[in-house]
Amino acid sequence: MKFSDFKVLTFDVVGTLIDFEKGILESVRRLGGEAAKHLSDEQIFEPYIRGRAAFPGRSSHAMAHVYLSLAKELDLPADPQTAAAFQRDVLDWPAFEDSVDALRRLRKHFRLVAMTNADRVALSA
């Protein structure tokens, strides 16, 4: 099969274009203060995954609860203001460095269709 056989490419946004893992780690380490700066990636992701499973709703609403859940497990600041800041950070998670250039190259050859299971607020950000 050749690439020229295709006219449309579909792809997921989060994890393909947006580096949500980097976003989570940077947000938790910044918001968690000194206690979070020395946590390993795994130490952050394990309670994050449990929190996300416990709060599976739309990311633009659920992430404050996810943060509070992981913060309690890791003994990090668990106040409403910090949770709200994590919630807002979701909208600013970084794109992978090559995302823009890759999309520019691909759009010359294909119609691109971005898909996501994130909600519209997160996707539009």
Image (cartoon, rainbow, N blue to C red):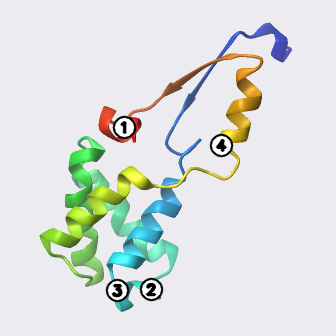
Residue that appears at 23% across and 42% down: 57
Locate residue 113, reporting x and y percent: 55, 20
Left or right side of 35 for 105: right
- Position of residue 28 relative to residue 97, above or below, is below
Give the Cα distance between marks 4 and 2: 28 Å
Circle 2 SS class: helix
Q: Calculate the distance from the C-alpha at mark 3 to the C-alpha at mark 1.
A: 28 Å
Q: Which mark is residue 50?
A: none
Query: Type of residue at label 2?
Result: Lys
Q: Point out the tag, 4 or 1, that comes first from the N-terminus.
A: 4
Q: Are marks 4 and 1 in contact (CB under 8 Å)?
A: no
Identify the residue under disc 3.
Answer: 33
Near mark 3 (Cα within 10 A), the count class, few <14, some 14-19 or many ≥20, is few
| Measured Cα–Cα span from mark 1 to mark 2 | 28 Å
- Residue 37 is labelled as 2
Counting from the top left corner in percent of width and height, residue 61 is at 21, 47
The residue type indicated by label 1 comes to: Ala
Q: Residue at x 52, y 55 (%)?
A: 94
Residue to which mark 4 is pinned: 99
| Residue 8 left/right relative to 18 | right
Q: Amino acid at mark 4?
A: Ser
Badge 1 local density, few (<14 within 10 Å), some, or many (20+)? some
Q: Which residue is mark 1?
A: 118
Residue furthest to the bottom in view is 34
